[in-house]
Image (tube, rainbow, N blue to C red):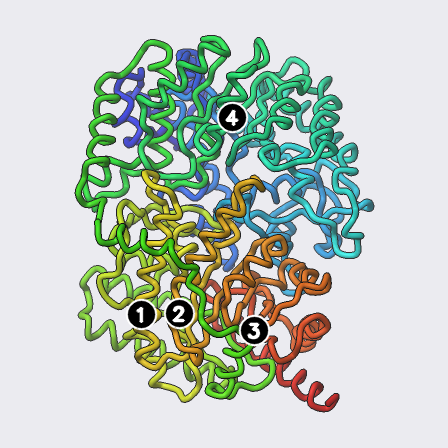
Amino acid sequence: MRYISVLPSIARFSSAFISFRFLSLPTTTASTNNRLTFFRFNFLIRTMASHIVGYPRMGPKRELKFALESFWDGKSSAEDLQKVAADLRSSIWKQMADAGIKYIPSNTFSFYDQVLDTTAMLGAVPPRYGWNGGEIGFDVYFSMARGNATVPAMEMTKWFDTNYHYIVPELGPEVKFSYASHKVVNEFKEAEALGVITVPVLVGPVSYLLLSKPAKGVEKSFSLLSLIDKILPVYKEVVTELKVAGATWIQFDEPSLVMDLDSHKLQAFTHAYSELESSLSSLNILIETYFADIPAEAYKTLTALKGVTGFGFDLVRGSKTLDLIKGGFPSGKFLFAGVVDGRNIWANDLATSLCTLQALEGIVGKDKIVVSTSCSLLHTAVDLVNETKLDKEIKSWLAFAAQKVVEVNASAKALSGQKDEAFFSANAAAQASRKSSPRVTNEAVQKAASALKGSDHRRATNVSARLDTQQKKLKLPILPTTTIGSFPQTMELRKVRREYKAKKISEEEYVKAIKEEINKVVKLQEGLDIDVLVHGEPERNDMVEYFGEQLSGFVFTVNGWVQSYGSRCVKPPIIYGDVSRPKAMTVFWSSMAQSMTQRPMKGMLTGPVTILNWSFVRNDQPRYETCYQIALAIKDEVEDLEKTGINVIQIDEAALREGLPLRKSEQAFYLEWAVHSFRITNCSVKDTTQIHTHMCYSNFNDIIHSIIDMDADVITIENSRSDEKLLSVFREGVKYGAGIGPGVYDIHSPRIPSTEEIADRINKMLAVLESNILWVNPDCGLKTRKYSEVKPALSNMVAAAKLLRTQLASAK
């Protein structure tokens, strides 16, 4: 028996909305008809124009994550996984219906990634996965996402400037596109069977191609947009099926429109939607953009597209778009106004949003404005109701996805003359509380951060001289081997941390258990003959959360999880006030680990830009001011590590690239303060102290000069999963004098690379980089892998490095 469940978190905030709590009907034929009647009636009474771009998939307590990992481990069936997914989807649709949302999205759920779903829909499966046609199933789908025992996964990279990762399509002139996954239609029908009429969401055809890359063996100069006429027939098939199924609206996500696009790329949008026009007839079509202001030429192109009914804009990160709308909006079209922030957790300032909406209403017309989120709520936490331990004052300042759904509808109701005065008053009181709270401001911190602006904080000696000094002390072999930081986080290890946090074991027992784990990791690395060791980070839950828990100005959630990629979720800290370091954070564990070995032990820190970009950041001061505050805190930690004899310190800046603004006109300023923040952290260390940094899963080629300007002694950087794209920079003549370790194997796949494969990768690196600066390391940390995968992979990595050392010695 299945029952209609209504989430209490929505009910709590939507008392003014008509709600039928008595409905709890078993699924008989009669009750199914009743249920359909209820939801259709529910749909009809939702007269306020409100819309959600997309919603988190993982579930309020990461239900999808655990179902996926159970399936991948062979502990549950495909049917079990599908049931968890269906329950999550129905819960989300019912939640939005109960909150009064008129335009409810479908097909924003995914088992891994929405771009990969589109690749499956188009049948664009790379040949190495052995797909021979037919409906794409889990075996092929997850092989593309994760690789398998014989072939590597597809490349993964950042979704615009977020911490979400998408699977990059591999395309070329020989790809035969075909309609190979009916997921979007199936999910629409699934919602319809529940009585919820949804707006199916598709990654738009032009953005899909612009987010792709030429497949291996295809010329880099190949025009991906030349494939537009090959993929449009599949889109037409999908649209036709949706129309037959009863869809009245379809949402095409075209976020690439906010980028700096040339006239050729803009013309592709005009061409694509002209070609689709006849298929789209009798449907309402929404083109959704997000993450930034839309440029004037793109705005002109977008609003002139044929067959389009409405246009969605991010009015939180794209505030200048308001001027374009005020300057002219097409008559008779719908404006989906994204005034509720989909990328942060702060409660919306409802009064300010209402003023914005009323001004827009005067331009586009009362019946043509739809209140929306700025982007998909995928990028925020799921439901604040699950945070029972959060400080009450701070909690009043917040809104997660479930609460943002209510904010959207409350704003739409207010705009239509049905303002919930009590709801708006409570919101205004929370806004005032946050502005006046003394816990937000620390004058000493603000003064110290302000004083930073007079210097560029560079180390006194150049990097080549520092490397010589460091080599005399460290005495490393050529092609030194290391890892990125974390080692596998076993169930036993997680249990120890959990029990310590719950006060079920004493501090003495906890320290003993962590010490044993560190010793195990140290002995393993020594046994593998790795040159520069790490302690494995067994005491850390997350590379940002661990530091945020020890810094002032941060607060933490219990269930504030956000999807990063696949089943991987992160729990971003919330930065609500000025940041400082009350005491040392890592010195105890790092010095303990160094005492266990004669080899260099890296001190492991997360850099200020990454802490900033992987947190929910306060929105009441510029981001760079918060970043400088964090940099000063990390600087204190670096100096303390050096004092205790740690000679190699890694300051990870994994997220530096993802914070890069999407518009070129804003990028130089960001890179200036971001790179400056990194230099602040280590500007005062001795020449003998070697500073490493690490970056992962982004396109670094366009910011290579800023990376050089960071002035780190060694950088380890993702390389293998992206087909060694990074190396092309050096082939094109960029000179890099610091140590560099482009990753030699992909740690996000369970596949174990052979010694020969890794040696081949190192040889490709040696073709463009000097052997005296090259390091050998994996792409990223090993936290998500099993020891059964890590040991042979690292063994092969060390063997490959030794093989190349022998060959280089023979050549000399």
**Residue 87 appears anywhere in the view:** no
Residue 677 rendering spot, x and y as whole percentages: 41, 57
Quadrant assignment, res 428: top left
Going by the numbered disc 3, the residue's amino acid type is Gly
Task: Say which residue label 1 marks.
Answer: 586
Neighbor class of circle 4 (other Cα within 10 Å; few <14, some 14-19, many 20+) is many
Residue 70 rendering spot, x and y as whole percentages: 46, 55
Find numbered disc 4 in the image and state the secondary structure of the residue it sits on: helix
Gap between marks 3 and 1 measured at Cα: 25 Å
Task: Say which residue label 2 marks.
Answer: 604
Tell me if 675 is positioned left or right of 185 in this view: left
Residue 244 rendering spot, x and y as whole percentages: 64, 19
Tell me if 187 is positioned left or right of 613 in this view: right
Badge 2 or badge 4: first in the primary sequence: 4
Where 162 sits versus 240, above or below?
below
Between residue 150 and residue 361, name the one nearer to us.
361
Gap between marks 1 and 4 measured at Cα: 45 Å
Badge 3 or badge 1: first in the primary sequence: 1
Q: Residue at x 56, y 76 (%)?
A: 464
